[in-house]
Amino acid sequence: MAAPTSATADACSGVSVPAPGRAQSPRRRAATAERPNYLGGVAGFLWFAIIIVPVYWVVITSFKPQSAYYTSNPMLPAAPTLENYQAVLEADFLMYFTNSVIVTIGATVPAVLVSFMAAFAIVRGGRGRFLRFSNTIFLMGLAFPLQAVIIPVYLIIIRLSLYDSHLALILPSIAFAIPLSVLILANFIRDVPNELFESMRMDGASEWATMWRLAFPLTQPALITVSIYQGLQVWNSFLLPLVLTQSPELRVLPLALWAFQGEYGINVPAVLASVVLATLPILALYGVGRRHLLAGMTAGFSK
């Protein structure tokens, strides 16, 4: 009698054998995974074009003389000149820039520090009713836009005799920056391994020392992300300076750009030169902290 074949032996032994060609080979899986996404590439290129074309137009127009703005091709550079930047710098631009720096730093640094301490207390402070209530209050702060409470904020600033001052811009900016900052920092602190906190506690460190010596360095990506985001919000704020300040000496850059637009209503290249100068600090800030932005924005999503 002939010896049974391997297929017959497998059938008799009750072992199921996959049908030929049904299992995908590793080489075929790798080829499928490396298949280029042409549709995504085209969509990304279109989105990049939508973003970069206005920026390109602003930059090249800021270097055009006023006489060439209406006669030259809007998308092609003309004879470059620095007269527009010189006119903007001579129109107290440095004073407006200094005011923006004071308000931005004065609002961002306290907001980030207070938010960090509040987030640490919410995450590491146990499950007390006061902490839960505080967390709820912070989350409720995200539901109220600035435009909805600008009149009460104006009345409070008037009652405190802070109208037309830097503090009139700094204090409301801190209040509106805290809710989102607490949410991001609390999610990031929750990702810190609990064993590290227990080790610090066994070494005799207090909660205050644990917060500044352990949690603060480990949450650096989230802190940088929150600082950049809130700094951009304050730097680009227009409504608060418009309502809470009046003196030209206290104008910040968004109001200054508005004033330049009135002063140079026909000289469009000078207006765009002021826009470029106001944007340079934002680009520098992004270049410094861009490596930490992704880690900070994805805080809390690793679990």
Image (cartoon, rainbow, N blue to C red):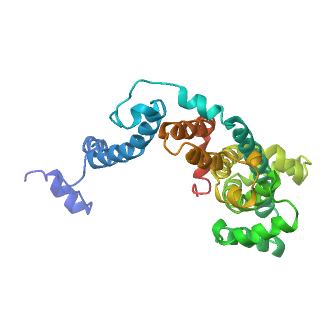
Residue 163 left/right relative to 67: right
Q: Is residue 225 visible?
A: no
**In this view of the protein, which residue sits in the foreground, 260 or 43?**
260
Residue 177 location (% of width, % of height): 71, 58
Residue 26 location (% of width, % of height): 29, 43
Task: Locate the C terminus by quadrant.
Answer: bottom right
The residue shown at (59%, 32%) is 87
Q: Quadrant of residue 290?
A: top right
Q: Is residue 117 visible?
A: yes
**In this view of the protein, which residue sits in the foreground, 164 or 182?**
164
The number of numbered badges drawn on the structure is 0
The residue shown at (65%, 72%) is 148
The residue shown at (77%, 43%) is 102
Residue 203 location (% of width, % of height): 89, 46
Q: Quadrant of residue 33?
A: top left
Q: Is residue 193 above or below residue 281?
A: below
Residue 140 location (% of width, % of height): 69, 72
Residue sitting farthest toward the left: 1
**In this view of the protein, which residue sits in the foreground, 125 or 70?**
70
**In this view of the protein, which residue sits in the foreground, 135 or 3?**
135
Residue 113 left/right relative to 188: right
